[in-house]
Image (cartoon, rainbow, N blue to C red):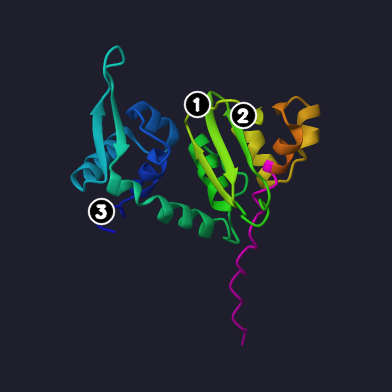
């Protein structure tokens, strides 16, 4: 907790789980963190050997932050915390969701039983971000790698994806309304979005007896 327990510390780790980011990208993913606080968290994580800064080669020339090998070992912990958090009786289902949060949330909610017998590679486009999604043997892998010959391509927004997963918006309706565009195997795409059942919420605390 001394290494990652300060406010925004684990959220910085979350933002870097899917790959390196520039400071401006981190700011976009953590809009409520002030630049000064974010800079301080990054310095602390660098000193703790969790994050490192690397300069990109020309023509980019900019600096990016990325997790060290040891820092990436925090991935299962972050995902486990996400899976625990969604069971909160007061979970804010209408809260704004960033791209990386949405992707990692899908990883946390993934149900191996629902994916039994499903083997597919998909390309998922969320706004300006693109992801390779591989589902096989009851496991899911999502990364920002190029996709060659995907079974299906799904194009949508983070908001619509959130509605499909969290609020059970029907994919067919979203396609009719132009909120989702699917190329390729539509059956694979439709089954894919059903692999993320919401867990049962934790019971709220019982009221103490009066008198």
N-term-proximal mark, 3 vs 2: 3
- Which element is circle 1 on? loop
Residue 104, image x and y in percent? 51, 44
Whether the magenta-drawn stretch holds residue 149 is answered as no
Q: Which mark is residue 178?
A: none
Query: Which residue range is magenta in the image?
Result: 192-211
Judge whether residue 195 can be spotted in this image. Answer: yes
User: Would residue 200 be counted in the magenta stretch?
Assistant: yes
**Image quarter (top left, top right, bottom left or bottom right) of the N terminus:** bottom left
Could you say which is closer to the camera, residue 141 or residue 84? Answer: 141
Of badges 1 and 3, the one in the foreground is: 1
The x, y position of residue 138, in whole percent, is 60, 52
- Whether pointer 3 and pointer 2 mark residues with C-beta atoms closer than 8 Å, the reply is no
State the CA–CA distance, disc 1 to disc 3. Answer: 33 Å
User: Residue lying furthest top in this view?
Assistant: 59
Query: For the residue labelled by badge 2, is the local secondary structure a helix, a strand or a loop?
Result: loop
Q: Residues within 10 Å of mark 1 (few under 14, many from 20)?
A: few
Return the residue at label 3: 3
Q: Is residue 157 left or right of residue 31?
A: right
Q: How many marks?
A: 3
Q: Is residue 174 above or below residue 210?
A: above
Furthest residue toward bottom = 211
Residue 12 lies, in percent from the top left, at 36, 42
- Image quarter of residue 26: top left
* Front position in the image: 14 or 18: 18
The residue indicated by pointer 1 is 146
Q: Which residue is tagged 2?
A: 150
Q: CA distance from mark 3 to mark 2?
A: 40 Å
The quarter of the image holding the C terminus is bottom right
* Residue drawn at (67%, 46%) of the image: 118
Q: Residues within 10 Å of mark 2 (few under 14, many from 20)?
A: some
Q: Residue at x 22, y 40 (%)?
A: 43
């Amino acid at each position: 907790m001394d290494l990652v327990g300060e406010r925004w510390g684990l959220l910085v780790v979350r933002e870097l789980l899917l790959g390196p980011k520039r400071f401006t990208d981190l700011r976009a993913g953590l809009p409520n963190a002030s630049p000064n606080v974010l800079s301080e968290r990054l310095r602390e994580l660098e000193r703790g050997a969790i994050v490192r800064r690397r300069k990109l080669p020309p023509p980019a020339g900019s600096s990016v932050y990325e997790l060290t090998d040891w820092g990436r070992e925090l991935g299962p912990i972050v995902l486990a915390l996400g899976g625990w958090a969604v069971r909160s009786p007061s979970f804010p289902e209408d809260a704004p969701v960033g791209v990386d949060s949405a992707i990692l949330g899908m990883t946390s909610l993934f149900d191996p039983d629902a994916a039994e017998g499903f083997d597919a590679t998909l390309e998922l486009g969320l706004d300006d971000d693109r992801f390779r999604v591989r589902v096989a043997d009851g496991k899911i892998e999502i990364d920002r790698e190029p996709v060659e010959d995907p079974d299906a391509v799904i194009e949508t927004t983070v908001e619509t994806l959130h509605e499909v997963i969290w609020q059970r918006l029907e994919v067919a309706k979203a396609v009719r309304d132009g909120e989702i565009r699917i190329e390729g195997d539509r059956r694979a795409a439709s089954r894919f979005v059903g692999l993320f059942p919401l867990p049962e919420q934790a019971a709220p605390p019982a009221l103490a007896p009066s008198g």
